[in-house]
Image: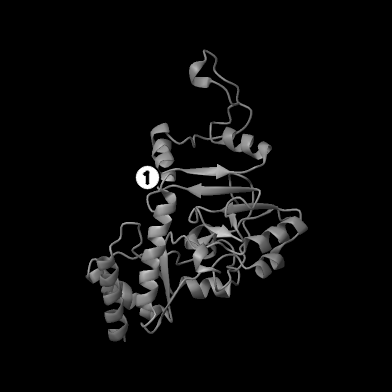
């Protein structure tokens, strides 16, 4: 397996659990060794994973808990916002996320030391200071890169923050419309959160009974110029980057990845367009071999 050249770590993949598609705490526990440094769960498609169970495991084993909340801005788990439960978290603001700015992201933490390190890493490893307002060349303490978000992009994000609750509300209403329509289509189920009120619906993802149904649905939707996308098949542990090592046995991940499909989802998606997607799915499943 090729290790991560940035941090010198080898990723160890754990399986997902069937309900949220997030990391399965039991699978995570079975993978922990003396060399384990951190647990990195993803809140997939806008649904919180079993983050408090993973937090307990991290605490008991003295591990860092790093949340990937890129798809779940605004989602909550037991009343706490995802991204605020672990030691540090990553957010994404690219065009299809809950709070879009066009591109960019953020790192959030309540750990002052980690905050300083993240800030330095995103700014060439430079010590914080008035670099652009000073005659000095600055001091560089560590390895870093240029991950600074442009001010104009950040300004877009600040404006989006004022209406993010409405954006999430719109997404949930669209998801409810999808759910109602899909409930009577055989061969298809929907991705669910532990509680649908906690799902912010960054994507609306369905899961087919088998892969052939999915392929026929993709063909039908594409022929009608309706966008759809697979996240993710092959799953990461089967990706090119890790082909030098034997693929771990992750039966739930392998099964789910071969059958999921994400449908159009954005806050201004009209009811008429949702009905068009649903009608096309019905046609696909009726005519599928």
Q: What count of labels does the image hold?
A: 1
Residue drawn 52% across and 57% down? Answer: 75
Q: Residue at x 38, y 33 (%)?
A: 152
**Rendered residue at 41%/58% (across/down):** 169
Residue 227 is drawn in which quadrant? bottom left
Residue lying farthest to the left in this orientation: 224
Q: Is residue 2 visible?
A: no
- Looking at the image, residue 176 sits to the left or right of residue 52; the answer is left
Residue at image point 35% right, 57% down: 267
Left or right? Give the position of 100 relative to 69. Answer: left
Left or right of 156: which side holds 46?
right
Q: Residue 250, position in %: x, y?
A: 58, 71
Q: Which residue is mark 1?
A: 102
Q: State which quarter of the image contains the C terminus.
A: bottom left
Q: How is the image coloured?
A: one colour
Measuring from the top left, give residue 119's x and y in whole percent: 57, 34
Decide which of 106, 288 is in the foreground and name it: 106
- Give the image location of residue 97, x and y in percent: 42, 53
Residue 112 lies in what quarter of the image? top right
Residue 118 is left or right of residue 225, and the answer is right
187 shown above or below 179: below
Quadrant of the image for the N terminus?
bottom right
Q: Secondary structure at mark 1?
A: loop
The relative height of residue 2 versus residue 287 in the rendered view (above or below) is above
Disc 1 packing (10 Å; few <14; some 14–19; many ≥20): some
Image quadrant assignment for residue 39: bottom right
212 up-or-down from 69: above or below:
below
The location of residue 170, given as percent across then percent down, is 38, 59
Depth check: 74 or 29 in front?
74
Q: Answer yes or no: is residue 254 visible.
A: yes
Residue in the foreground of this view, choosing between 13 and 242: 13
């Amino acid at each position: 397996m090729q290790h991560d050249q940035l941090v010198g770590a080898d990723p160890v993949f754990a399986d997902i659990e069937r309900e949220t598609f997030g990391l399965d705490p039991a699978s995570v526990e079975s993978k922990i060794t003396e060399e384990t440094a951190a647990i990195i769960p993803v809140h997939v498609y806008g649904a919180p994973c079993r983050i408090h169970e993973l937090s307990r495991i991290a605490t008991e084993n003295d591990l860092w808990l790093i949340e990937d909340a890129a798809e779940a801005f605004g989602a909550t788990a037991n009343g706490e916002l995802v991204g605020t439960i672990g030691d540090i978290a990553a957010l994404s603001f690219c065009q299809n996320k809950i709070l879009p700015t066009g591109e960019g992201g953020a790192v959030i933490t309540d750990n002052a030391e980690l905050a300083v390190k993240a800030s330095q890493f995103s700014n060439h490893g430079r010590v914080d200071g008035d670099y652009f307002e000073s005659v000095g060349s600055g001091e560089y303490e560590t390895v870093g890169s240029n991950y600074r978000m442009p001010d104009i992009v950040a300004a877009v994000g600040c404006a989006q923050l004022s209406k993010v609750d409405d954006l999430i509300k719109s997404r949930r209403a669209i998801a409810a419309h999808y759910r109602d329509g899909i409930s009577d289509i055989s061969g298809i189920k929907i991705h669910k959160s532990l509680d649908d009120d906690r799902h912010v619906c960054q994507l609306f993802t369905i899961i087919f009974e088998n892969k052939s149904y999915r392929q026929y649905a993709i063909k039908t939707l594409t022929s009608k110029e309706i966008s759809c996308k697979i996240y993710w098949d092959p799953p990461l542990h089967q990706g090119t980057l890790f082909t030098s090592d034997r693929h771990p046995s992750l039966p739930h991940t392998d099964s789910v990845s071969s059958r999921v499909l994400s449908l159009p989802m954005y806050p201004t998606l009209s009811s008429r367009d949702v009905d068009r997607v649903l009608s096309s799915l019905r046609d696909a499943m009726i005519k599928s071999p």
